[in-house]
Image (cartoon, rainbow, N blue to C red):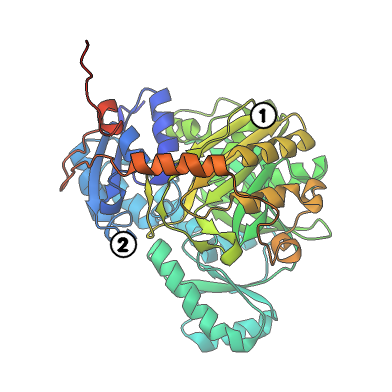
Amino acid sequence: MFKKILIANRGEIAVRVIRACRELGIRAAVIYSEVDRASLHVQLADEAYLVGPPAPRDSYLNIERIIDIAHKAQVEAIHPGYGFLAENADFATRCEQEGIIFIGPNSRALRLVGDKLMARQTMEAANIPIIPGMKAVGRDSSVYAEEAKRLGYPVMIKASAGGGGKGMRIVYEEKELKAALEAGKREALAAFGDESVYLEKYLEEPRHVEFQVLADNHGNIVHLFERECSIQRRHQKIVEETPSQALTPELRQRMGETAKKVLQVSGYNNAGTVEFLLDKNKNFYFLEVNARLQVEHPVTELVTGIDLVHQQIKIAAGEKLSWKQDDIKQNGQAIECRIYAEDPARGFLPSSGKILYLQEPRGPGVRLDSGIYAGWEVPIYYDPILAKLIVWGENREIACRRMQAALRDYVILGIATTIPFLRDVIGHPEFMAGRTTTNFIPQHLANWCEMNREPDLKRLAQAAAAYMEINRKPVYRAEGLERLTRPSPWQTLGHWRIGGGD
């Protein structure tokens, strides 16, 4: 097993991996940008290293800088989290060249499945059903226009080099295509360092169902069942659950075996997610492979009892999977809500600023993966995810009720968040009935605004008191590649003094 790992990420996913490292007896080193000096992942890590300025291309996407830090910190492996360089084959290759283990798929498999076009070609050759679309990146806008006519509108623009909804655009008419392509390329470049995009036929009102798969370095592959991810805004998931209400046992088995075949034909190892679209007639189509840990991995952990980050690390260290397919069972229902620093009443515009007050939900069956604390300044430079709220129940009705209660108990003041919107999603009759598609939000909550909620004076008073205390927080120095000293409890208390006796 490894003695020290570098986590090349930030926020709640970096905190999640730090906790896994602690449980496995591994020291965790992290990187941070100049704007992330006071972030929670920096405070929790055993070691922290400044990687660069706030812009992602100068920090969390800076491969050479991260490799230099890995050598300085003398780590044996790098965990990329999700986003940033997690699906970057060049980064995995550099790790291999430098003798550093990349906790993810090997660079060849990553290059194959990380490029959505190459993955589509491979799956089509293996007789796995795919959505009609382009077979190569276009040279200019005229090529995309011809392909769109061939496929028939509406079409979907997708980034070739990454996922998470980045770069995705739906185009309904030819006059919209050029502007959408330019916007998709800009977003893809900013998120993945690669502006390549392609077109697929857009399936209207499908369900988005994905399968979690694990593959070790010894040829063993298992799936850990499905996750339903149909509740999306701007093509990015915000609510996930398992099991899916759409799958029969027979369909679940077929899709699970297909997901395993996808990884097998790709020569894939470590954790991965095979994504499908499921149409109204229960036909499923291969969408893509997310060659990393998924944001929504906790719901799978809650219903299977298998820690996916532990498994990633163990597989990377050369260990074999501990189970056969028949050993893995689903137990109960799990739901996850992603908590974003966004204003849902203003088209989900990002919201930055200081968190003045934080009250986190607790209780049986409630889990919170978070990267924030009261007094932290939410930056403008990165994906706005703050935390993930996950609940488990013996059945779906209990899980939904538990999530509603947890969202009512979750308070973040000082910035706009998606919490009130998520309360209305979970409480919607169509969601409660399990009738969800990727068009759920446009159909049912398109003009959402928070209503019938009076201000909570007690919470506002608590926020005011917290704000006064937060403004007296200490400042920590960290320069160059020097290790950032973890703040002591005395520092985090703010101003204090030792009182004298009488």
Can residue 166 be seen in the rendering of this structure? Answer: yes
Task: Report the number of discs.
Answer: 2
Q: Secondary structure at mark 1?
A: loop
x 20%, y 15%: residue: 500
Q: Nearer the viewer, residue 216 or 85?
A: 85
**Image-based side of 377 in relation to 444, left or right:** left
Q: Is residue 346 above or below residue 424?
A: below
Disc 1 vs disc 2: Cβ atoms closer than 8 Å?
A: no
Res 328 label: 1
**For mark 2, what is the residue?**
57
Image quadrant in which the C terminus is located: top left
Nearer to us of marks 1 and 2 is 2
Q: Secondary structure at mark 2?
A: helix
x 76%, y 33%: residue: 398
The quadrant in which residue 256 appears is top right
The quadrant in which residue 283 appears is bottom right
**Image-based side of 391 in relation to 190, left or right:** right
Query: Residue 90, position in %: x, y?
Result: 35, 57
Query: Residue 133, position in %: x, y?
Result: 63, 72
Q: Is residue 495 above or below residue 440?
A: above
